[in-house]
Image (cartoon, helix red, strand yellow):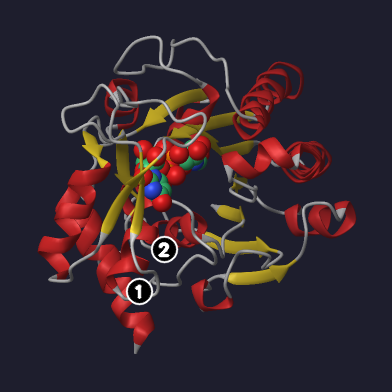
C-alpha cells in the first residue's frame, strides 16, 4: 500500500515507519509528512520519502495525500498539562489540523485512516482495568481533542466511507530494541525520559509526584507500553480495516501496572547509576492508577506486546540515551 505517515519523524511515528517498512505481510511505499516542530530529521528513513509540511497548510497537505491508499496520523500536541493552559494551541493543531486531514482525505479519495488516540479520552477511572466501553470523560483538554476527533471519524465513516482505527495508547515508552530509531524527544516530561535524564546526569534527581496514593508502594501506577509494540499495532490495525472494511477503536496497553518507584528501581538496576529521587506533592489531575484491558486488540488484531515488560522498557531507553551521549 501507499501509506502517508503524518508526524512520521516523531517519537512514535518513526517507530511506525520502521514497522511499515519491515511489514512481512505486505510491501508498503511509505511517505513521511512532518513539520519537524518536534519530529527529528535523524528519525527519517532513506527507504521512505519525506515531505516537510504542516497539517495547517491545506494545499500542501492535500498534494501529499494524492495517490495515497492510507494515512496514519500522529501529528498532535500531547502534553496534557500544557493543554489546560494553552487550549487554543491544541484546538488549532489537534482539531483544525485533523479536520484538514479528514477533508483532504475525502477530496483525494484516501479511504483508510489510522489515528493515534489516547487513554486520556477516558479520564478518571471508574473501574480497572479500563476497557473500550469505559465512560469517556476526559479530565484535560488534550484528552478532549482526541475524543472529539474519534467522533469526527465516526461521522466521516458513516457519511464518507472512511474506515478508521482509533488506537488508544496508554503510556508509550521505550525505544527501538534494534537501536535504529534512537532520536530523543526534546524537553521530555514523561516519567521514563525524566528518569533517564537523571541516570545520565542531566538532572540531579527525579521528582516523584506523590507517595501517598492508594497503591502498593504509594506512588502512581501506569500501564507502560513499548513503542515497538505500539508500532506493530498500527500495522496490524491497518491490515484489519482494509480486510474487514470496518472501523475500530482499541486500547493499547500492556495490562500491567508499574509504579513510579518500580520504574526508578529498575533503572538503578539496569543502568548501575544511583538515580536520586525525592518525593514531592502530587501532580494535579493525576489518577492513582491506570491499567488497560487490551483484550479487544488481542482478539481482533492478534496483537501481543513483546517488549512491554519493565526491564525491556528501561533497557531500550537506556541504550538510546547512551547512544546520544557519544
Ligand atoms: C507517569 C507517572 C506521574 C514525571 C501522559 C499523558 C497521557 C498519555 C500518556 C498520550 C505518573 C509520575 C512523572 C515525573 C513523576 N499521553 N511522574 N515524576 O501523566 O500518566 O500520562 O502520557 O496520550 O495523556 O497525560 O504520564 O509519564 O507524565 O507520568 O512522578 O517527573 O509518573 O505522576 O504517576 P501520564 P507521565
| Residue pictured at 54% horizontal, 64% vertical | 187
The residue to which callout 1 is attached is: 180
Q: Secondary structure at mark 2?
A: helix
Q: Is mark 1 within 8 Å of ligand 1?
A: no
Check disc 1: other Cα within 10 Å, few if <14, some if 14-19, many if 20+.
some
Q: Position of residue 145 (x, y in %)?
A: 68, 31
| Residue pictured at 39% horizontal, 72% vertical | 182
Q: CA distance from mark 1 to mark 2?
A: 9 Å
Q: Nearer the viewer, residue 278 or 203?
A: 278
User: Is there CB contact under 8 Å for labels 1 and 2?
Assistant: yes
The answer to whether residue 110 is left or right of residue 193 is: right
Please tell me in which quarter of the rendered image ligand 1 is found: top left
| Residue pictured at 76% horizontal, 64% vertical | 53
The image quarter containing residue 269 is bottom left
The residue to which callout 2 is attached is: 18
- Residue furthest to the bottom in view is 326
Q: Nearer the viewer, residue 33 or 264?
A: 264
Number of numbered discs overlaid on the protein picture:
2
Check disc 2: other Cα within 10 Å, few if <14, some if 14-19, many if 20+.
many
* Residue 241 shows up from this direction: no
Q: Nearer the viewer, residue 122 or 206?
A: 206
- Residue furthest to the right in view is 59
Q: Secondary structure at mark 1?
A: loop
Q: Position of residue 99 (x, y in %)?
A: 79, 36
Choose mark 1 or mark 2, whichever is in front.
Answer: 1
Amino acid at each position: 500500500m501507499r501509506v502517508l505517515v503524518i508526524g512520521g519523524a516523531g517519537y512514535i511515528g518513526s517507530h511506525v515507519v520502521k514497522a511499515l517498512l519491515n511489514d512481512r505481510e505486505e510491501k508498503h511505499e511509505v511517505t513521511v509528512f512532518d513539520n519537524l516542530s518536534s519530529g527529528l530529521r535523524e528519525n527519517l528513513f532513506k527507504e521512505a520519502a519525506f515531505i516537510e509540511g504542516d497539517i495547517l497548510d491545506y494545499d500542501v497537505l492535500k498534494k501529499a495525500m494524492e495517490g495515497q491508499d492510507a494515512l496514519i496520523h500522529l501529528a498532535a500536541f500531547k502534553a496534557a498539562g500544557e493543554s489546560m493552559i494553552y487550549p487554543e494551541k491544541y484546538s488549532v493543531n489537534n482539531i483544525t489540523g485533523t479536520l484538514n486531514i479528514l477533508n483532504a482525505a475525502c477530496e483525494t479519495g484516501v479511504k483508510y485512516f489510522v489515528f493515534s488516540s489516547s487513554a486520556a479520552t477516558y479520564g478518571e477511572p471508574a473501574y480497572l482495568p479500563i476497557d473500550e466501553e469505559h465512560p469517556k470523560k476526559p479530565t484535560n483538554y488534550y484528552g478532549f481533542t482526541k475524543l472529539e476527533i474519534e467522533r469526527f471519524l465516526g461521522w466521516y465513516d458513516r457519511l464518507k466511507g472512511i474506515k478508521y482505527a482509533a488506537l488508544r495508547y496508554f503510556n508509550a515508552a521505550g525505544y527501538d530494541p534494534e537501536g535504529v530509531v534512537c532520536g530523543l524527544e526534546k524537553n521530555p516530561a514523561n516519567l521514563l525520559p525524566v528518569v533517564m535524564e537523571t541516570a545520565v546526569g542531566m538532572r540531579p534527581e527525579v521528582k516523584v509526584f506523590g507517595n501517598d496514593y492508594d497503591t502498593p508502594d504509594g506512588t502512581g501506577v501506569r500501564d507502560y507500553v513499548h513503542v515497538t509494540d505500539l508500532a506493530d499495532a498500527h500495522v496490524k490495525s491497518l491490515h484489519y480495516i482494509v480486510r474487514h472494511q470496518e472501523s475500530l477503536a482499541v486500547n493499547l496497553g500492556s495490562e500491567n501496572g508499574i509504579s513510579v518507584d518500580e520504574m526508578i528501581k529498575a533503572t538503578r538496576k539496569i543502568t548501575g547509576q544511583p538515580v536520586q529521587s525525592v518525593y514531592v506533592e502530587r501532580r494535579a489531575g493525576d489518577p492513582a492508577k491506570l491499567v488497560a484491558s487490551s483484550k479487544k486488540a488481542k482478539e481482533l488484531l492478534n496483537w501481543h506486546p513483546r517488549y512491554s515488560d519493565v526491564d525491556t522498557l528501561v533497557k531500550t531507553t537506556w541504550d538510546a540515551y547512551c547512544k546520544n551521549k557519544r
